[in-house]
Every structure is written in structure tokens, then in C-alpha cells.
């Protein structure tokens, strides 16, 4: 190697080390955030800004909106459809769709009523049967997609009609089955609240887990000579999130407290978020959603990815129906109908999951359903017509898709540059 080449190599290494040092502090973290925003990687920023605007407007119009007890009720309502939206994220990441999640949740609800109440089957077995029915339906969709090439829009639309008929058949002429009001399942869906100390402990553990995983990631990236973001930036993020969580828990405990059903939803979100970001399966999901043919040539089992996504989607839809039955203390023909289907899909998209495939996160289901339920709850407190809820939700959904499209174009132009 010549002296000039050696000098050039040394200069490049020095610049790389300088970038690593620049990114290690808080200023580097902030600079990296603004760089990502300029490049079109908006993440959850639009939905967080939108949520702040929605809460500010409704609080101004009715101060009861941000009361602790009203927020507790909002969290109860978020849990059922939020779990269904979590499944929608899986198929949207592949650039697919499932239009039958509402009907699948209705079948899950009906199975609980028929098996547990009418047939006397133990509740855990009844729940397992409902989840198995969802997994079976998801496997059928994946089979139609991978073996016959049937578009998911068509197969799941057919499934919507078929599952709706099955729900009506299961419920029979009565059309409704009431669940035992004093049962643990109904109390879980309507009344059960985490102890104050436990909710604070869980909030603290969330920050601790984030810190440990962040430090591990920094160590791995530094070992690979990559920009790591630095410990100072990580500590800032952990501090902000931990303080925010502790403040939210404290405020909710001024009322009834944190619902166990919402804790279950958040637990599923965290598990799925870890799977999306930290596992080979999650990376394969994004690869297949970005370009299925390229993923196949890279050795990824595309068919297995499709099966896992559709099975998860339908299974979570059925679980949402089970929790809906617990929330309403009944299984009826109205379960899963109305706007359940569209709200679940809208929640995933509004939260930041791309309709174009390849991009999404479990947190989008959490943020999106909070936006939708905030709109519904705020309009109810103002005693306004449900027609406004549909129009406002539709407008928010349209804005979310526009932002996603513009961000996608910005990323593409930035990549070409």
C-alpha cells in the first residue's frame, strides 16, 4: 500500500471515529433524530403530534375528557380492538390485508358463549377452541395466497361473509348469549384493576428493560465499528419514557387505576414489537413485505412468513372477540360487526404501519387505537352524533395515508441522492 493510500485510509478512519464520538452524546442523538425526519423516517412522530392535538381540543371543549376515570374507561375500550389491530399490523407489513377480522372476532365471541355457557365446557378450553378456530382460518387464507395466488383482498372478503354466517348459525335464534356477570372473565373485562404498587413497578421495569437492551445494542454496534448513538442519548430516552410512564400511572391511579385488560394488550404489543425488531422472523417479515421475490432469492421461507402472518392476524382477531365478550358480558350477533373491522385496520394505518408493506411496528396498533378511541370518547362526552366520529376518523385515516405516502417518496428520493 502506498503512502498516499495509507494516509487516505487513516483519514477515513479518523472521520469514522469522529462520527462515532459525535453520535455518542445527547446532541448527536438529537441530530440523528432530525436527520431521520428530514429523510422521511418519521416513525411515530405524526401520530403523537396528532394525539396531542386531539386531546387538547377535547379537553378545551370538555375538561372531563382528561379526568383519570375517563381515561381508565378509554383504556378498557382500547384493549379489544387494539389486539385485533395488532394482528392487522402483521399482514400489512407483507403488503396484504385481512378484511374478515371483525367477523372472526364475532365467531370467537360466539364460541365462548356456546361452549362455555351453553355446553358447560371449561372456560380455558373454550378460549383455546376460539383461538384454534382463528388460527385455522388464518392458515386457510395463507394457503389460498401462497398455493393458488388468490389476492388476500378477495379471500378475506369471502371469509368475512362466511364467518358472519357461521356466527349467526352458532348463536341460533336467540341471537345473544349472556355471560355470568360475576364470573372472573366478565370481571376481567369490566372491573379488574392492577394494584397501585404493581403498576408503578411495571412502569419502572419497562425503563430498566429499555436501558439494558439499549446498552447491549450500543456494545454490539461499537464492536462492529458502527454508529451507536451513545450512552448519554440512551439515558435521556430512558429517563423521559420512565418519567412519562410513572406520571401516567400515578394519574390513572388517582381514579380507578390501570386495567388488567389493557396490561394484557400492552404485554402483547411489547412481545410483538420485540419479535418485529429483534428476531430473524421480524427481519424476514420486513424483507418479504419490501420485495417478496428478492426475499425468496435470499433464502427466506416466504410461504412460512405468509402463514405466520395470517395465522397471527386471525388468532389475535379471535382473542379480541373473546375479550369483547368479557367487556360486554355477552356474545351477540352484533359482536364484530359495525365499525370493528374498519377501526382495527384504521388503527394500524393511523399508528404508522405502511399500506405499501415492509414498514410497521406493534406500537402502531397501540398508538392508532388510542387515537380512534379518543375521538369516539371525546365526541360521546360532547353528546355529538356518531356521524361526526365516522367523518373525523376517515379524515384522520386519509391524513395518515398521505403522510405515509409522502414519507415514502422522501425516503426514495433521499436514497437516490
Image (tube, helix red, strand yellow):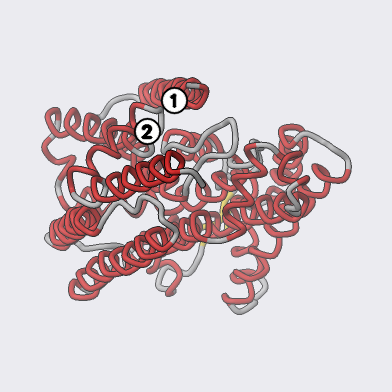
Please, which residue is most extreme toward the right here? 148
In the foreground, 234 or 333: 234
Tell me if residue 315 comes above or below residue 33 in the rendering.
below
Left or right relative to 113: residue 266: left
Task: Name above or below for residue 413 compared with residue 201.
Answer: above
Q: Quadrant of residue 39?
A: top left
Q: Secondary structure at mark 1?
A: helix
Residue at position x 50%, y 65% from top?
Answer: 179
Q: Bin the neighbour count of mark 1 within 10 Å (Cα to Cα): few under 14, some 14-19, many 20 and up.
A: some
The numbered dot on residue 407 is 1
Residue 403 vertical placement versus 358 (above, below):
above
Give whichever of 268, 11 is nearer the camera. Answer: 11
**Badge 2 or badge 1: first in the primary sequence:** 2
123 displayed left or right of 82: right
- Is there CB contact under 8 Å for labels 2 and 1? yes
At horizontal 67% and vertical 73% (from top left) the residue drawn is 119
Q: Is residue 154 above or below residue 207?
A: above
User: Distance from label 2 to label 1 (Cα)?
Assistant: 7 Å
Q: Is residue 137 visible?
A: no
Query: Which quarter of the figure has residue 58?
Result: top left
Residue hosting label 2: 42
Residue 381 vs residue 135, the one in the foreground: 135
Left or right of residue 83, residue 142 in this image? right
Kindly identify the residue that appears in the image at 88 percent across and 40 percent down: 148
Please provide percent x and percent y for residue 154: 76, 32
Q: What percent of the width, then of the height, locates residue 357?
A: 60, 36
Mark 2 burial class by Cα count in 10 Å: few <14, some 14-19, many 20+ = some
Amino acid at each position: 500500500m502506498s503512502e498516499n493510500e495509507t494516509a487516505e485510509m487513516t483519514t477515513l478512519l479518523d472521520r469514522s471515529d469522529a462520527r462515532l464520538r459525535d453520535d455518542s452524546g445527547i446532541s448527536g442523538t438529537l441530530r440523528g433524530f432530525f436527520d431521520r425526519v428530514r429523510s422521511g423516517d418519521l416513525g411515530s412522530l405524526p401520530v403523537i403530534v396528532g394525539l396531542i392535538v386531539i386531546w387538547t381540543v377535547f379537553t378545551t371543549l370538555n375538561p372531563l375528557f382528561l379526568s383519570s376515570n375517563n381515561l381508565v374507561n378509554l383504556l378498557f375500550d382500547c384493549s379489544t380492538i387494539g389486539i385485533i389491530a395488532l394482528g392487522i399490523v402483521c399482514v400489512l407489513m407483507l403488503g396484504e390485508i385481512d378484511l374478515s377480522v371483525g367477523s372472526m372476532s364475532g365467531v370467537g365471541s360466539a364460541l365462548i358463549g356456546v361452549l362455555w355457557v351453553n355446553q358447560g365446557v371449561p372456560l380455558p378450553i373454550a378460549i383455546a377452541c376460539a383461538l384454534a378456530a382463528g388460527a385455522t382460518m388464518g392458515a386457510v387464507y395463507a394457503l389460498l395466497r401462497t398455493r393458488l395466488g388468490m389476492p388476500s383482498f378477495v379471500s378475506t372478503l369471502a371469509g368475512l361473509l362466511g364467518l358472519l354466517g357461521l356466527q349467526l348459525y352458532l348463536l341460533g335464534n336467540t341471537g345473544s348469549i349472556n355471560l355470568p356477570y360475576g364470573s372472573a372473565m366478565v370481571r376481567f373485562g369490566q372491573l379488574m384493576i392492577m394494584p397501585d404498587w404493581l403498576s408503578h413497578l411495571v412502569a419502572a421495569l419497562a425503563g430498566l428493560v429499555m436501558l439494558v437492551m439499549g446498552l447491549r445494542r450500543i456494545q454490539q454496534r461499537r464492536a462492529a465499528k458502527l454508529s451507536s448513538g451513545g450512552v448519554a442519548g440512551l439515558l435521556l430516552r430512558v429517563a423521559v419514557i420512565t418519567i412519562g410512564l410513572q406520571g401516567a400511572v400515578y394519574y390513572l391511579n388517582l381514579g380507578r387505576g390501570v386495567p388488567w385488560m389493557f396490561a394484557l394488550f400492552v404485554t402483547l404489543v411489547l412481545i410483538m414489537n420485540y419479535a418485529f425488531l429483534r428476531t430473524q422472523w421480524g427481519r424476514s417479515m420486513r424483507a418479504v413485505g419490501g420485495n417478496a421475490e428478492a426475499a425468496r432469492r435470499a433464502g427466506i421461507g416466504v410461504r412460512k412468513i405468509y402463514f405466520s402472518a395470517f395465522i397471527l392476524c386471525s388468532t389475535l382477531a379471535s382473542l379480541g372477540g373473546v375479550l369483547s365478550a368479557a367487556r360486554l358480558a355477552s356474545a351477540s350477533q352484533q359482536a364484530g360487526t359495525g365499525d370493528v373491522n374498519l377501526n382495527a385496520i384504521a388503527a394500524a394505518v393511523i399508528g404508522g404501519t405502511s399500506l405499501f408493506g415492509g414498514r410497521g411496528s406493534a406500537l402502531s396498533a397501540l398508538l392508532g387505537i388510542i387515537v380512534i378511541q379518543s375521538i369516539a370518547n371525546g365526541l360521546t362526552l360532547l353528546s355529538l352524533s356518531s356521524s361526526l366520529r365516522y367523518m373525523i376518523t376517515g379524515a384522520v385515516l386519509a391524513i395518515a395515508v398521505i403522510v405515509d405516502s409522502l414519507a415514502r417518496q422522501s425516503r426514495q428520493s433521499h436514497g437516490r441522492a
